[in-house]
Amino acid sequence: MISNIERYKKDLESLVRRGSLLWAAMQHECLGKQYEDRVREQFGKEKADAFLKKLPDFKSDYQGWYSESRTLIKQLLPDRLSDFVRHYEKPKPRKAITYESYRIDDYLQKLRVTRPKPAWEGLGENTVVDMSAAIPHFEQQLAMVKSVQARFESSLFDIRQLVQADLFDSELDAAKELAKYNFLRAAGALAGVVLEKHLGQVCDNHSLKVTKKDPTISDLNDLLKGAGVLQIPEWRSIQHLADLRNLCDHDKKVEPTLDQIRDLLNGTAKVTKTLF
């Protein structure tokens, strides 16, 4: 089975490759013949024409690239997530659309702002801002994705979370095997350990100080909700998983059901893959 580290590296290589093509497509759309001439001068007419024909449609392909990149930035470079999103989303509030306030979302709508020329300049319009204003924003997003990729080549990169993710996957697989052979209480207890460890790591990721020496799932869940990392529906879902874990660990009078254990296993797997 491919490790999480190798999977992340392949995903990043794909995102950088696709992002580079999107960047070229954006320039082609904004600069037209000027960009075509530049590419032909660099690569020659035959190679340049073949390259230009293969460029993606930015509007169609960007959203998928953005969603995947946002997820990886959130997990591997969380301190830059707000910057990454800021280059896409329109600033709030925005009193006027200017070069400084233009964003990629405006580009996707092909937004262009003009104003009439002064009388002494004759008829026509002057451009206040056009789609080219989004090019620097996408360049910054692509640079962030490339910076994540560079971390994999650095000996200073902390791979603890990636190794931990592999371990969690293995432990959940073991819990599923226990459930398969009707060792329900043991399966639930193991899943609870995985959930507790992951929530502790999420608290570390967000620099949240855990005051209790041996915090429970509920303690960590409350801390994350209080810090705004979790919304109410997510908090309730994790609290339900905590109740199921407690049933397996503490309540010896009531045996957990197979459906309850499946809920705990599936819920834990979802949290470890979506909450960082």
Image: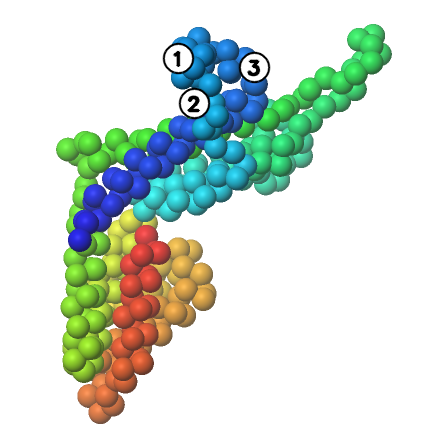
At mark 2, the secondary structure is helix
- The one nearer the camera, 131 or 250, is 131
In this figure, which residue is indicated by the disc labeled 1? 43
Residue under the image location 24 percent in, 34 percent down: 151
In-image side of 157 versus 116 (left or right): left
Q: Is residue 18 above or below residue 220?
A: above
- Name the N-terminal-most of marks 3 and 1: 3
In this figure, which residue is indicated by the disc labeled 2? 51
Residue under the image location 25 percent in, 90 percent down: 254
The tag on residue 33 is 3
The tag on residue 230 is none
What percent of the width, then of the height, locates residue 173? 19, 66
Image quadrant assignment for residue 226: bottom left
- The one nearer the camera, 22 or 264, is 22
Mark 2 → mark 1, Cα distance in angstroms: 9 Å
Image quadrant assignment for residue 180: bottom left
